[in-house]
Image (tube, grey):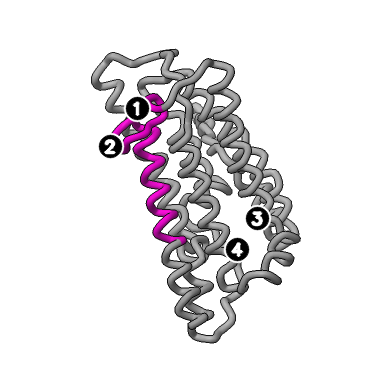
Amino acid sequence: MKKSFITLYGLLAYGTFLFAFLYMIGFLANSVVPTTIDNGTSHSLAQAILINLSLITLFGMAHSIMARSWFKVWWTRIIPEAAERSTYVLQAALLLLLIVWQWQALPTSLWSIENEMGRLVIWGIFWLGHVITLVSTFLINHFELTGLQQIWYYLREQEPPPMTMKQPFFYRIVRHPMQLGLIIGFWATPDMTVGHLLFAAVMTGYIMIGLHFEEKALVRQFGDDYRHYQNTTPKLFPRFRLRRPVSCLSLGG
């Protein structure tokens, strides 16, 4: 019974995560879903900003606290260790859904790209960002990140393998491609409004703060290997180096 419950719980958490991720894309694109970033409940400017900031703060605080090692040690005294990651994923998905449900629209336009080709390019960048985020989860271990791997090993009565450092594909370009993809998705829009700018700016700020603590945790976990990775690979934004022109010397005969 316990194994069945944890399995169903993990599947529920994973399904909620997928739904929240897809809903967020529609929310940012002002398309498909019923409540979007520019088409929702509206209050006065001050009240709307206060509500929106409170929603993101709640999401950020819960997300950050539950990611800390001290919290995991305490939390797994209450819930089965196999369900810890699924619980983390579930709370993040539910709080993200709370944001998109209760978001207060601030639809005042800041800029709008009228050129059709320009709009297509921006939407292409928007989708590229979300694809980078999703692909990046699979490049390291999508099912470990979403809690399903832990449950699989629990059902087989085996210990999950220890985490190892890997730098596949995107991870050779930047250390945090998942977060880079999210930032691209937050900012890439042909129609920027006050509400969209607020969401993109505050969520980007939260990501930067979260990465500061995540980097410290990764150094503690992987030591000099991660320090070398920090020295050789940028954190978030790729470095593009131009090759110096090769000088050709000719000696006259």
- What percent of the width, then of the height, locates residue 103? 47, 31
Under mark 1, the amino acid is Ile
Q: Are marks 3 and 1 in contact (CB under 8 Å)?
A: no
Q: Which residue is drawn at 31% across and 38% down?
A: 33
Q: Mark 3 points at which residue?
A: 67
Q: Which of marks 3 and 1 is in front?
A: 3
- Disc 2 secondary structure class: loop
Q: Do the residues labelled 4 and 1 touch (CB within 8 Å)?
A: no
Q: Name the residue under label 2.
A: 32
Specify the segment rendered in magenta: 13-40
- What percent of the width, then of the height, locates residue 81? 62, 72
Q: Mark 4 points at which residue?
A: 165
Q: Are marks 3 and 2 in contact (CB under 8 Å)?
A: no
Neighbourhood count class around disc 3 (C-alpha, 10 Å): few under 14, some 14–19, many 20 upward: some
- What percent of the width, then of the height, locates residue 88? 57, 58
Residue 245 visible in the snapshot: yes
Residue 209: which quarter of the image? top right
Neighbourhood count class around disc 2 (C-alpha, 10 Å): few under 14, some 14–19, many 20 upward: few
Q: Mark 1 points at which residue?
A: 122
- How far apart are the alpha carbons under marks 2 and 4? 38 Å
Under mark 4, the amino acid is Met
Q: Are marks 1 and 2 in contact (CB under 8 Å)?
A: no
